[in-house]
Image: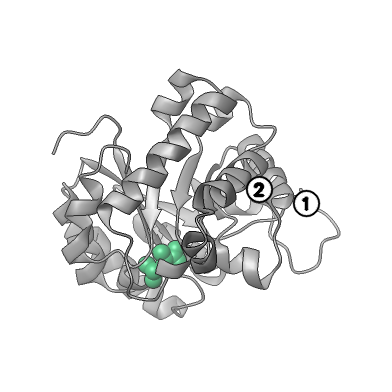
Amino acid sequence: MEKERKLIITGNWKMNKTVAESLDLANGLVRELKDVTEVDIAVCPPFTALGAVSEVVIDSNIRLGAQNMSENGYGAHTGEIAAGMLKEFSAKYVILGHSERRQYQRESDELVASKAKAAHEAGLKPIVCVGEQLEDREGGRTEEVVGTQIRGSLAGLTTAQMEGTVVAYEPVWAIGTGKTATSAQAQEVHAFIRNLLGDIFDEDTARIVRIQYGGSVKPDNARELMGQADVDGALVGGASLDVKNFSEIILNSI
Ligand code: PEP
């Protein structure tokens, strides 16, 4: 299918996979996906496997990403990882503000915005996640909630930085639950986000930014979701942990 923006499909391995398992998965993906040029592909292993996976994907069409980073540079921040450390592994992307971090680590829009700024300053492309809870959707507050997250989490980015940012719309009720937003529900929110980006930045920027959908994306629903005008890829959790599932999501999306 011909799309206005190149699709970007990212695997978020979350807190899964030992180094040995990560190597198996990465090697399998390199093998299965070596001929894909139509989609930008990235995998985000846990920090402990970044070095090993980096060596496997470095000469392939698969890029590396991390699942989080500090808003600070190097220094006295025990337990944190600086953007510059991710760059050492040739990481290109970093997921920021995932709903699990917003929920369990209490990450705010303001914090996500400072991380996004720091990522760009270090030469990393942030994948900034937004999405409503089930009660927000049922209460008719999806646009209000997602709009607030978009304004807050992207605050302070220049238009050039925004163009190099990926937005991931992930309705929280669809993450890891097996419940996928319908393609119409996804398209509606993606179009809303793009319009809002036009208001905050400008129309050209809004047209360039890629907006991924995330939430129980599987091989059998990928094609329809990716076929929506404003859906420019996927952020995949559970199904990215398996060579066959993640490869099929990508191959079915082309
Ligand atoms: C995610 O965590 O970003 C995600 C979309 O997970 P899943 O695909 O498992 O719903």
Check disc 1 and report the residue beneath it. Answer: 74
Q: Which colour assignment does the render follow?
A: one colour
Report x, y in % for residue 131.
51, 56
List x then y, in percent, for residue 113: 68, 44
Label 2 SS: helix
- The amino acid marked with disc number 1 is Tyr
Q: Residue furthest front?
A: 139
What residue sits 52% from the left and 53% below the top? 129
**Mark 1–mark 2 CB contact (< 8 Å):** yes
Q: As rendered, which of 189 and 162 lies closer to the eye? A: 189
Determine which quarter of the picture holds residue 57: bottom left
Q: Which residue carries the number 2 mark? A: 84
Q: Position of residue 126 (x, y in %)?
A: 54, 45
> How busy is the neighbourhood of tag 2: few (under 14 within 10 Å), some, or many (20 plus)?
some
Residue 34 visible in the shown view: no
Q: Amino acid at mark 2?
A: Gly
Mark 2 and ligand 1: say if the CB distance to the nearest ligand atom is below 8 Å. Answer: no
Q: From the top left corner, tell me how far across and down residue 91 is, in percent.
A: 50, 50
* Horizontal side, residue 71 vs residue 189: left or right: right
- Residue 24's mark? none
